Amino acid sequence: MSAVARLLLLAHCLLFTTYSLTAQVTKAPSRKAGEGDGPYNRLIIRGVTLINSTGAPPYGPVDIVVEKNRIVAIRQVGYPGVAIDPKSRPVANAGDKELNCDGMYLMPGFVDMHGHIGGQAQGANAEYVFKLWLGHGITTIRDPSCGNGLDWVLEHRAKSIKNEIVAPRILAYTVFGQGSKEPISTPEQARAWVQQNAKRGADGIKFFGAEPTIFRAALEENKKLGLRSACHHAQLEVARMNALATAKAGLTSLEHWYGLPEALFDDKTVQDYPADYNYNNEQNRFEQAGNLWQQAAKPGTDRWNKVMDELIALDFTLDPTFNIYEANRELMLARRSEWHDDYTLPSLWRFYGPSRISHGSYWHNWGTEQEVAWKKNYQLWMAFINEYKNRGGRVTAGSDSGFIYQLYGFAYIRELELLREAGFHPLEVIRAATLKGAEALGMADQIGSVEVGKLADFVITKENPLANLKTLYGTGAIHLNDRNEVERVGGVTYTVKDGVVYDAKKLLADVRTMVAEAKQTENFEITQPGVPAKAGKISGGGKN
């Protein structure tokens, strides 16, 4: 591997960590009075319909008893439409907290497997991101890069564990090579970096690719230390190690889909790049990626089945992050999502816009041809993911928000909708968002399902999410009532993380205030590219 190639790869690997070397997003403030209640010595949640995420259908009403941050009892207390006998219910003692959730729905807290904690370029600070996540029921996130620096992330991880800040539980996966003074160029250097990463307290590693002997050495050492790993198989290295090769070498999860089509090639070994392709041209990169699945082996072929079977046998996790590329198949849909008005910061909106510099802002000349190709991409991609799940493979939910018009929290709910589009039953969608994520993180004994002995992480809603996943959005879903009036219904009512009960709508109200103040300071309006502000203002976004 040439020195120039190593430098290019290092630059790519540091894509999400550049700002950690010079500046970080503002740290989350200490949790203030009124920002969540608890944990309590004893909390009783009354009357919910339980979606426990083990694969069981909903049942209820049940009362759930929590002591501090652990579930100690789940008691069925009646039948739908029948008055509950008070004698069947757990007795509240003096000092106990009771939460009346009659007629509501309770699920495990959501796990976002691909959660970048803001970004200096986006102007998105930790409080903004954390409240958007918790406001949508996300109680655990995996930071797949530690873009603010590992020490910064570990500090917030520790504060979250103690509930000193308003934040989900955090797992830190450092970008391979982060902090190295020079590119890692030998297996010995790779092993030494992995050992040091583990000593510093990281939960795992995020790769973008590496020279094969280096990549294998790092994965082997990481596995030996009992840590997990993730990879965005960047085009700069995927031809040498695709998803199947890295899984065999010890990688535990694949991010997005890069590396899968390459593993499915049966008539070529390299993507069909045009002669004028340049990886540093973001439109080139994403435009041509839209043709990639059509170059792979077709569903049901020998190659398709062989790759899928081998990955499942390796207990390999697929974290598709469908949502982050949705603008590729329908740019207007992503740009005009109603939550942008009230929840997207001015700095973040500018970052999303067409640019030759900002990552993921590749709308140089994006049109119908690119969108049609990406729609075909999604059909094949979704077919692989759904079949992988059906054959027993693990599929999780991740968002990768902060890029390509995808907003923290909201994008995660969109990911759930896209899993549904891929063919998942709503119960399978919730399981992917909870228990499957917990399994992938090695935390299924602690989180991911509502069972006695596990941590008290819950999402509580008034609407049935299995009937309409859109009711999980912070903006709710449109509903026509019996009086022929249009209203908003839904949104998460309570997010419970580690026994602390958060008013999810209040968290989102705090975010709206942050955005409104930023807009007022900058005299800012969201506009269409190339259109004057007054003419291009977007209106009509919903509120809770």
Image: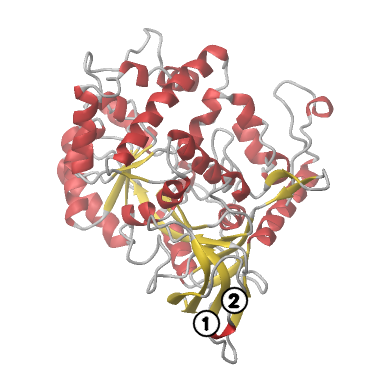
**Residue lying at the far front of the rendered structure:** 82
- Label total for image: 2
Q: Residue 76: x and y, percent? A: 48, 73
User: For the point 56% across and 56% down, which residue is it?
Assistant: 130
Camera-nearest residue between 373 and 193: 373
Please tell me in which quadrant of the rendered image residue 242 appears. top left
Camera-nearest residue between 390 and 197: 390
From mark 2 to mark 1, how far is it between C-alphas?
8 Å
Q: Residues within 10 Å of mark 1 (few under 14, many from 20)?
A: few
Q: Give yes or no for contact between labels 2 and 1 (Cβ–Cβ under 8 Å).
A: yes
Q: Residue 200: x and y, percent? A: 32, 61
Under mark 1, the amino acid is: Ser
Please tell me in which quadrant of the rendered image residue 309 appears. top left
* Secondary element at image label 1: helix
* Secondary element at image label 2: loop
The residue that disc 2 covers is: 84
Q: Residue 91: x and y, percent? A: 54, 87
User: For the point 50% across and 36% down, which residue is it?
Assistant: 323
Under mark 2, the amino acid is: Ile
The residue that disc 1 covers is: 88
Residue 323 higher or lower than 188, as above or below: above
Camera-nearest residue between 487 and 291: 487
State left or right for residue 330 relative to residue 280: right
